[in-house]
Amino acid sequence: MLRVRAACKRFGAVIALDGVTFDVAPGEVLALLGDNGAGKSTLIKAISGVHRLDSGSITLDGIDISAANAMAVRAYGVETVYQDLALFDNLDPAANFFAGRELAGPSWLPRGLRVMRRRKMAVRTRELLDRLEVTLPDLEAMVALMSGGQRQAVAVARAVAFSSRLVILDEPTAALGLRESARVLDLVRRLKDDGVAVILISHSMDHVMAVADRALVLRRGRAVGATVPTPDNHEQLVAWIVGADGSRAI
Ligand SMILES: Nc1ncnc2c1ncn2[C@@H]1O[C@H](COP(=O)(O)OP(=O)(O)OP(=O)(O)O)[C@@H](O)[C@H]1O
Ligand SMILES: [Mg+2]
């Protein structure tokens, strides 16, 4: 479904991606592993339309999205939770949920109508969060006032709610406790059951082993290995991550 071919991206003198090639199938959970600075976030930002590749291509069900912007990629059913979350601090969860797809309508609508639609957004947000078993003490509170874990929950729930083909999660459990992490992993499994593909970036090998079908390791912008993340392959994965085995790009 997703095809990335020879993806290259540099930032000045830094080569963040150096010819990365891989595929993701529908309903597949692909873990993206690698040390700090390996190029993981750059790669997923290229897919989600935040960065444009210098060369290489990205296709989704055969459609070339290499040059598509973030809005267009979302319209293709790809939802991304960024490492820095990209929530609007000054808005409540409902407004964050519907940012860019507001039901409130344009400002020239009569005020009464806008208020009604905003109420509808709040109800819909509550439904979505309930369905995902995410509990927030106060749905009206600005996101800035929430804990790291609650912010993460809103971001993941939003991605799950609106995705249709692919969900990209950049370290979604980084700020979460044990129980909250388990819930995020449950959401990942649910997406998989629905045939939605998932790219999961995580530094937790336990989380990767719990949900991923395959793990792709990046090192210095290159894909250096891919395998099924099982306890048996743990050592191999770590060797690829730290570059202990002298392996070259695949
Ligand atoms: N916007 C940018 N401008 C300049 N350099 C960047 C930018 N984004 C990333 N880089 C550089 O590209 C390289 C890859 O960064 P990237 O954020 O993709 O790593 P990562 O694998 O996500 O690391 P981490 O595990 O720490 O999140 C790093 O050397 C980083 O400094
Ligand atoms: Mg990153």
Image (cartoon, rainbow, N blue to C red):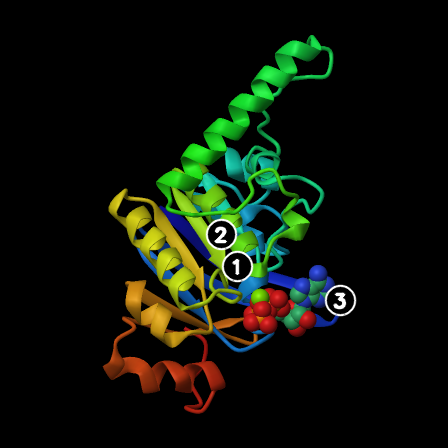
Q: Which residue lies furthest to the top in this view?
A: 110
Q: Position of residue 137 (x, y in %)?
A: 52, 47
Q: Do the residues labelled 3 and 2 touch (CB within 8 Å)?
A: no
Residue 145 horizontal side relative to residue 56, left or right: right
Q: Residue at x 59, y 58 (%)?
A: 147
The reply to whether residue 238 is visible in this rendering is yes
- The residue that label 3 is drawn on is 12
Mark 3 vs mark 2, CA separation in Å: 35 Å
Q: Residue at x 58, y 76 (%)?
A: 36
Whether the residue under disc 3 has CB within 8 Å of ligand 1: yes
In front: label 3 or label 2: 2
144 lies above or below 219: above
Q: Position of residue 96 (x, y in %)?
A: 60, 39
Callout 2: SS: helix
- The residue that label 1 is drawn on is 149
Q: Which residue is drawn at 36% across and 69% down?
A: 207
166 lies above or below 37: above
Q: Are marks 2 and 1 in contact (CB under 8 Å)?
A: yes
Disc nearer the start of the sequence (3/2) = 3
185 lies above or below 115: below
Q: Which residue lies furthest to the right in this view?
A: 12
The amino acid beneath tag 2 is Ala
The amino acid beneath tag 3 is Gly
The reply to whether residue 103 is visible in this rendering is no
Q: Could you say which is closer to the camera, residue 184 or residue 228?
A: 184
- The residue that label 2 is drawn on is 153
Q: Could you say which is closer to the camera, residue 34 or residue 169?
A: 169
Q: Position of residue 75 (x, y in %)?
A: 51, 33
